[in-house]
Image (spheres, rainbow, N blue to C red):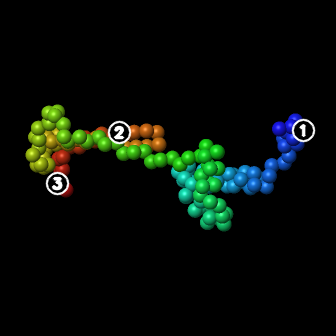
Amino acid sequence: MSESGYYAWSKRQPSQRAQDEQQLAKRIEQVYQASRRTSGSPRVQAELRDQGVRCGRKRIARLMRQSGLSARRKPQRAHTTDSQHAQPVAPNRLNREFRAERPNEKWVTDITGVWTSQGWLYLGVVLDVFQADA
């Protein structure tokens, strides 16, 4: 490439296609942010189509890739129960009889994990099964 050709190229205005893609990339970014970063190229294309913008999904995917935009995936559910184990099992002391004659006689517990935006939150519950007659 000649030196004069390089400088002519470097001073040239962006092409109409490049300008159109820059505007489209801005609209893609707006749709992506409005979806809380969960939409991939098919959903972005559908939203742009609803707004009257005609564009191919592969073009949108390319522009999203160039901008570093990718859909956030839902966290996979953790499988926490394994009933096929060799560990000892606690005895069933209540034998499904959940009526208590007085308070502090029978207690039941459970624990569960809840996924939040800040990670796993563990919730433990302890209940006295005694119910006073109304």
- Mark 3 or mark 1, earlier in chain: 1
Residue at the disc numbered 1:
4
Where is residue 23 drawn, in percent x and y? Answer: 72, 54
Front of the two marks 2 and 1:
1
Q: Secondary structure at mark 3?
A: loop
What residue sits 55% from the left and 50% below the top? 36
Counting labels gives 3
Where is residue 70 drawn, in percent x and y? Answer: 56, 47
Residue type at mark 2 is Tyr
Quote the CA–CA distance across marks 3 and 1: 97 Å
Residue at the disc numbered 2:
122
Front of the two marks 3 and 2:
2
Using the rendered view, name the quadrant where residue 120 is placed: top left
Where is residue 21 drawn, in percent x and y? Answer: 71, 53
Quote the CA–CA distance across marks 3 and 2: 33 Å
User: Residues at badges 3 and 1 in contact (C-beta under 8 Å)?
Assistant: no
**In the displayed structure, would residue 55 be above or below residue 7?**
below
Q: Secondary structure at mark 2?
A: strand
What residue sits 69% from the left and 55% below the top? 24
What residue sits 57% from the left and 54% below the top? 41
**Quadrant, the C terminus:** bottom left
Residue at the disc numbered 3:
133
Residue type at mark 1 is Ser
Quote the CA–CA distance across marks 2 and 1: 67 Å
